[in-house]
Image: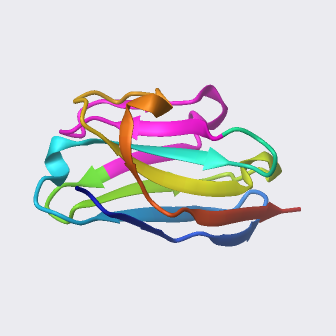
Amino acid sequence: QVQLVESGGGSVQAGGSLRLSCAASGRTFSSYAMGWFRQAPEKEREFVAAISRSGGSTNYVDSVKGRFTISRDNAKNTVYLQMNSLKLDDTAVYYCAASRVSYSSSVKALYDYWGQGTQVTVSS
């Protein structure tokens, strides 16, 4: 069992930056690939970024490439999402998730554990 707690969300103007963190419980954090997903009002939850168990491989949805960076610190049981050049369309609840696969999967169904989400609001 893995428990995930996100933090770092908030309100920011377009062009600004935020850094999301996701702290995981347990001693097996490095056994999980980690991902970030987001869900805007009345939309499906969508993949944003993922990172492999070791951190050696990352994967991003096209709309955030070059703006967002996912990273992890296995010693601290934490995964991060650095979000720069934020746009209005980035407004959503952001969820951290853990997957038993080893690679940086974008497939929502492969994720076994989910956090409660943190709100990110980008305004003009």
**In what quadrant of the picture does the C terminus appear?**
bottom right
Residue 52 inside the magenta-drawn segment: yes
Residue located 22% across and 61% down the image: 77
Q: Is residue 28 left or right of residue 111?
A: left
Instruction: Name the residue located 57 percent from the left edge and 30 percent from the top edge.
Output: 61
**In the picture shown, does residue 48 fall above or below 82?**
above
Picture quarter containing residue 93? bottom right
Location of residue 10 (image quadrant): bottom right
Q: Residue 112: percent from the left, percent from the top?
A: 35, 42
Which x, y percent locates residue 31?
Answer: 15, 43
Name the one closer to the observer, 12 or 110.
110
Is residue 19 or residue 5 the one in the foreground? 5
Query: Which residue range is magenta in the image?
Result: 45-71
Residue at the left extreme, as displayed: 27
Does residue 63 show up magenta in the picture?
yes
Examine the rendering and report whether any part of residue 24 can be seen. Answer: yes
